[in-house]
Amino acid sequence: MIDLRSDTVTLPTPAMREAIARAELGDDVYGEDPTVNRLQEMAAKITGKQAALMVASGTMANLIALMVHCPRGRKAIVGSKAHTFIYEAGGGSALGGIVMVPVANLETGALDLAALEHELATPPDAHFAQPALVALENTHNNCGGVAVPASHLADAATLARRHRVAVHLDGARIFNAAIALETDVAALCSYADSVSFCLSKGLACPVGSLLCGSRDFIAQAHRVRKLLGGGMRQAGIIAAAGVVALETMVERLAEDHLNARALAEGLGLVAGINVQAVSRRTNMVFFEVDGDQRTAEKFQAALKERDILIGRRGPNSFRAVTHYGIDRAAIDRAVCAAAEAAGEAFAG
Ligand SMILES: *Cc1c(COP(=O)(O)O)cnc(C)c1O
């Protein structure tokens, strides 16, 4: 199977399995798991923050950040296509009592700055929920996996600061962003008060995310993690793979970007397939097939018959994601299979 549905399907490397088996462990709710502590120190250093907290998932990391920055009844301003807004089960509202306010995401993954400014300028009147947080996302999943340039993060953060509102960065794939933008992770994180990133995507860990910020923020995050049932005990089992990921799996993400570009170029040559252009592509390719939903279903089924899996995004739109486990030969096979599948689907 060539599974291009997501980079979350990645399996741990042999070095990770080895590290998991040998991990030194303790009770992390007491802060006594040496492997978790080591991973958290590494994460804080890489993101340029004072401290970090390992949590179960990116969703939990973002929810904790929302709940720490944003008291009940206050507004969190998020992108209209943001993962926090669309794909996290409404946790901010359901569990945090937060008013989630979407501001338009442009195709570049940027927030519409005029709309952001309008939301931030909510009058200090008893009628209105008051803003407490702006959440950004990089890379921007729903905008084609695009890497959002530092200049936009800076612009959004400047507006937020002017209104004394905190900034959280959903950096689930921040390492992809840094590689695509040829900058370092800490530079991208410098505009945000807190940042989350995932170990379990392109970095190939089985589970885990990190939330990073000031020491005071992380102390509060520790409490909210417990509140959400996310206090884990000998969590060094998870952290051990994360240490290996940060040491050995970051630079190879560039390979995924090259493979995604090859996939985009290959699919772009297939009649009836329209690849979404992206200003700074990372490891994702979004595309549509001509015709209606039935044609799209036939296309996807014909690909599956050829052992290629892709993700469905809309009636006739799809997403393919490259990752550890997908090499150039797999890309070439996928493009050939897509040409055949398109031929079958359009033949009626
Ligand atoms: C995957 C993802 C998350 C959530 O991570 P989970 O570990 O799946 O909960 C958050 N934000 C973005 C942009 C993501 O792609």
Image (cartoon, grey):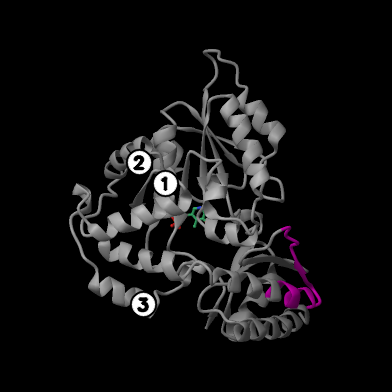
Tell me if residue 277 comes above or below residue 262 in the rendering.
above
Indicate yes or no: mark 2 CB to ligand 1 under 8 Å.
no
Corner quadrant of residue 313? bottom right
Determine whether the residue tagged by mark 2 lies in a helix, strand or loop.
helix
User: In the rendered view, does 127 fall on the left or right side of 240?
Assistant: right
- In terms of sequence position, does the residue under pointer 3 or pointer 1 come before the other? 3
Q: CA distance from mark 2 to mark 1?
A: 7 Å
User: In the rendered view, does 22 fall on the left or right side of 286?
Assistant: left
Rendered residue at 78%/82% (across/down): 347
User: In the rendered view, does 203 fall on the left or right side of 134?
Assistant: left
Q: Is residue 34 among the parts visible in the rendering?
A: yes
Asked if marks 2 and 1 touch (Cβ < 8 Å), the reply is: yes
Q: CA distance from mark 3 to mark 1?
A: 25 Å
Which residue, given by chain and number where applicable, does mark 2 sit on?
Answer: 218
Type of residue at label 3? Ala
| Towards the viewer: 42 or 202 | 42
Type of residue at label 1? Cys
Type of residue at label 2? Ile
Rendered residue at 64%/55% (across/down): 147
Rendered residue at 59%/85% (across/down): 305
Tell me if residue 327 comes above or below residue 319 in the rendering.
below
Which residue, given by chain and number where applicable, does mark 3 sit on?
Answer: 15
The part of the chain drawn in magenta is 263-279
How far from the left and from the top, in percent, is residue 272?
79, 73
Q: Residue 212, labelled with which disc? A: 1
How far from the left and from the top, in percent, is residue 153?
62, 42
Q: Quadrant of the C terminus?
A: bottom right
| Towards the viewer: 15 or 284 | 15
